[in-house]
Image (cartoon, rainbow, N blue to C red):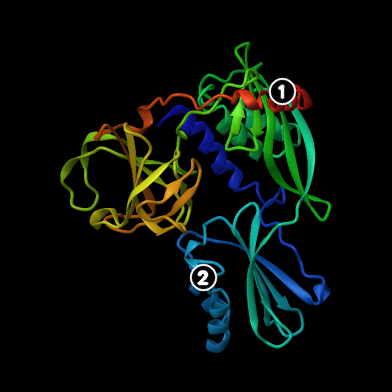
Amino acid sequence: MNRVTFAVFAVAVALAALIVVHGGHSGKVLLPEKRESLREVDKMIPSGYSFEALLNDLSLTTTTRSSIVASMDNVYDTSKLTAGHVLSLFTDAATNEVKRIVYNVNADQNLEIQNTDSGDWRSAVKDIPYDIKIETIKGTIDSSVYQTLIDENKDPRLAVLLSEIFAWQVDFAFSVQKGDSFEMIYEARYLNGVYKMPGKILAAKFINSGDPYYAYYFKSDKTTEGYYDENGNSVQKIFLKFPLQYKYISTYFTYRRIDPVNGAVEPHRAVDFAANYGTPVVSIGDGTVIDAGWRGEYGNKVVIRYNEEYTTTYGHFSSFAKGIKIGAHVKQGQVIGYVGATGLATGPHLHYEVRKFGTLINPLSINPPAGKPIDSGDKDAFAKITSTYAL
C-alpha cells in the first residue's frame, strides 16, 4: 500500500469511532414546533442499507411510504445513502408515530422529511446553519498528528485534513517523527453553541525533520482556488492522489492475479479500493467525461480525459452523480459517482485505472506536475491572506 495512503486512511478508520464523541455526526436542525414532544433516535447507516429498507423497518403503512417517496421526487436521490452517515428519526413521544426524518447528506447539508399538520409529507435539502469560529491549534508530535490532537483535546479529524493538504510534500506514514510540529488556523463549525466539526483549514504549517512546509487557502474572484505556499506556488498537484476515502486497497496493480470471479490467472492493471457502499468518488482533476454508462464487467463506468496524456477509468459505481454524462466537464474534487458492486464485482469497491498516452500504468506510481501558481493579478490579495493568517 502507498505509505501516505496507509496513514491517511488508517486515521480515517479510527475517526469513525470518534465522530459521535465530537458531535460531528449530523448537524441536525430541530424545528421549533413541538420539539419537546418528539423523541429522537439516531441510526448510523450500515453498508448496503437502502432507503426502502429504512421505510420497511419503520413499519409504515403503504400509503405513508408512498407519500414519503413522492415527496422526494426531484429533491434527493435516496439510492445515494452513504454508509457511516447518520439518519435521525423523530417520533411522537405519545403515539410513537414517525413525524420527521433527517439524513445527514454531507458536512454542509441535511435531507429533511417532515410530516405536516395536514398529514402530507414534504422533503427538502437544507444547508446546515453553522456558526463559524476561527481557531488555532499547535502541536509537537510524539507519535502522530492524530494522537497529538487527541492529547490537546482537539478534533482528530483535523489530522486527515492536514495530511490531505500536504499529501505530496510529507510522507505521513514513515517520515513523520518525534519532535516534528504543526500549526493550523481553521474554521470550527458550531451549531446552537455546540462544536460539531472542523471546516476548512485556512492556513497550515508542518515542520518535518526541520524542514518547514506552508499552505494557505486562497480563492480569487476568478477561478483560482486551492492551497499555496508562502511564495504563491501550489502545494497541490494537477491530480488528487486518490479519488475517494477508502478502507484499504483490496487489489494492487499486477500482471498476475487470480480473478476472484472466474479463477483465471490474469493481469490486473488497475487498483481496487474497498469502500463502503455509496461512498462518493471524485474526479482527480479537471477534465471531460468521454464515456459514462453500463459497460459489461465494469458495471456503471465513467472515463475522464484530463489532457492529451492522461485518462482515468472508474468502475462498479452504484450510481452516477447528477450531470455526469458523455461530454460533461468536471472539476478536480467533483463527485462523479458512488461506490457500488455493479458488473463483475464480489463486493463494493472502486475499480480505478489510469492510462498515460493510452497505456495502462500503476495509479499509485504517477507523479503529476504541480498546479498553477497564484496569478500575478492576485498576488496582493494573496499577500493579505498570508498576513492575516501568519504562521
164 in relation to 133, above or below: above
Judging by the rendered image, the residue that carries numbered circle 2 is 51
- Is 386 left or right of 312, judged from the image as shown? right
301 in relation to 239, above or below: below
Quarter of the view holding residue 391: top right
Quarter of the image with the N terminus is top left
The residue carrying pointer 2 sits among few (fewer than 14), some (14 to 19) or many (20 or more) residues within 10 Å by Cα, namely some
Q: Secondary structure at mark 2?
A: helix
In the rendered image, residue 256, in percent from the top left (x then y), is placed at 20, 36
Judging by the rendered image, the residue that carries numbered circle 1 is 383
Q: Which residue is drawn at the image coordinates 81% and 72% (left, top)?
A: 35
Q: Secondary structure at mark 1?
A: helix
In primary-sequence order, the first of circles 1 and 2 is: 2
- Is 300 left or right of 69, judged from the image as shown? left
Instruction: Look at discs 1 and 2 and give the one toward the viewer.
Output: 1
In the rendered image, residue 315, in percent from the top left (x then y), is placed at 33, 50
Extreme residue in the front direction = 377
Q: Which mark is residue 302?
A: none
Amino acid type for the residue under numbered disc 2: Phe
- Is 336 left or right of 352, judged from the image as shown? right
Closer to us: 103 or 329: 329
139 in relation to 298, above or below: above
Q: Which residue is drawn at the image coordinates 54% and 80% (left, top)?
A: 70
The residue carrying pointer 1 sits among few (fewer than 14), some (14 to 19) or many (20 or more) residues within 10 Å by Cα, namely some
357 in relation to 71, above or below: above
Closer to us: 289 or 83: 289
In the rendered image, residue 243, in percent from the top left (x then y), is placed at 45, 41
Extreme residue in the top direction = 210
Quarter of the view holding residue 214: top right
Q: CA distance from mark 1 to mark 2?
A: 48 Å
Amino acid type for the residue under numbered disc 1: Ala
